[in-house]
Amino acid sequence: MEDFLTKLRRSYAAGSLLTKLLYINVGVFLLVRALLIVLRLFNVEGAHVLALLQAPSDVRLLLLRPWTLVTYMFLHIDVLHLLFNMLWLYAFGRIFLLFLDGRRLVGIYVTGGIAGALLYVVAYAVFPYFRDMGMTSYLMGASASVMAIVFAVSFYRKDYTINLLFIGQIKLLYLALGVFAIDFFSITSANAGGHIAHIGGALWGLLFALQIQRGRDLTAPINALIDRLANMKKRREPRMKVSVGGGGRAESDAAYRERKRREADALDEILDKLRRSGYESLSSDEKKVLFDASRAQGGGGAER
């Protein structure tokens, strides 16, 4: 079991930022489900505990629980909810990474989720249809974050096409607009809050794409904050020594992660050069790095 956890931790550390987002969502789901099972065994109502992590529609309650603007986007109600969102995140996250980097992917995931939650809260406070319900609603799920990613890449590269089963080739932009239309016409349905949050995430993704084309990165502030938090964690964590390469040389976990990060950054630069100028533009060393990365992935292309 310890060996499995070590491999899992190493896989997370060496993975792309998209992979890390997938790991975090799945990990949070498993932890929350385990917690709810334990609470049920003691006849404790888990919904009250879960509400501390969900984004409430009531503004006053949100002011008392501001962390829910972030925590809600990593919660999922069941396996199907998680699976559907992770499939969309994986598929469109990979497309996003064809044109933009992983830091911006994380940034748009977080800020898009926050934008979706804020529009959800505003809608429930402004429109009489929701105010007249007389009850607090709660929001959970990564859908708003995923919609932000979908719209960001769709409007950043409006000419990009994908192949859909039974439909064939279609521009990603048209798919995004179709999903937006479904959400708009569903804002008075039973899942009104979810659809409103999707729209908020989509609008933020659109704004991100328009601004990045003008040289302004809307994800820069949140990425700077994430960097500061990560650096604080690194300074506090113990420096464990591990042996690498079979030669007995000691390497701390922090050094291992830093080495993997540098390797991932170098691979990203090579892949960018490959997309811009083709395989023949790569040097022999760059081709070797690309070959080694492909072999490490089991013969497939390197994931970004």
Image (tube, rainbow, N blue to C red):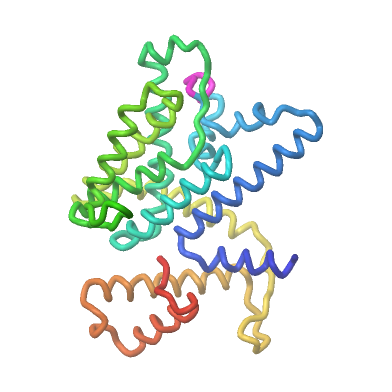
Q: Position of residue 2 (x, y in %)?
A: 74, 66
Q: Position of residue 292 (x, y in %)?
A: 45, 83
Q: Give the residue at x 68% y 76%.
A: 242
**Residue 293 appears in the picture as rendered:** no
Residue at the far front: name it. Answer: 166
Predominant SS of the magenta segment? helix
Which is nearer the eye, 286 or 196? 196
Name above or below for residue 2 compared with residue 246.
above
Which is nearer the eye, 217 or 288? 288
Give the extent of the magenta segment.
57-62
Q: Position of residue 33 (x, y in %)?
A: 66, 42
Name the quarter where the C terminus is drawn: bottom left
Q: Give the residue at x 38% y 53%.
A: 105
Q: Quadrant of residue 277?
A: bottom left
- Residue 182 among magenta residues: no
Name the quarter where the N terminus is drawn: bottom right
Name above or below for residue 242 compared with residue 79.
below
Q: Give the residue at x 35% y 84%.
A: 286
Name above or below for residue 73 compared with residue 226.
above
Residue at the far right: name it. Answer: 42
Name above or below for residue 213 compared with residue 2.
above
Q: Give the residue at x 32% y 73%.
A: 271
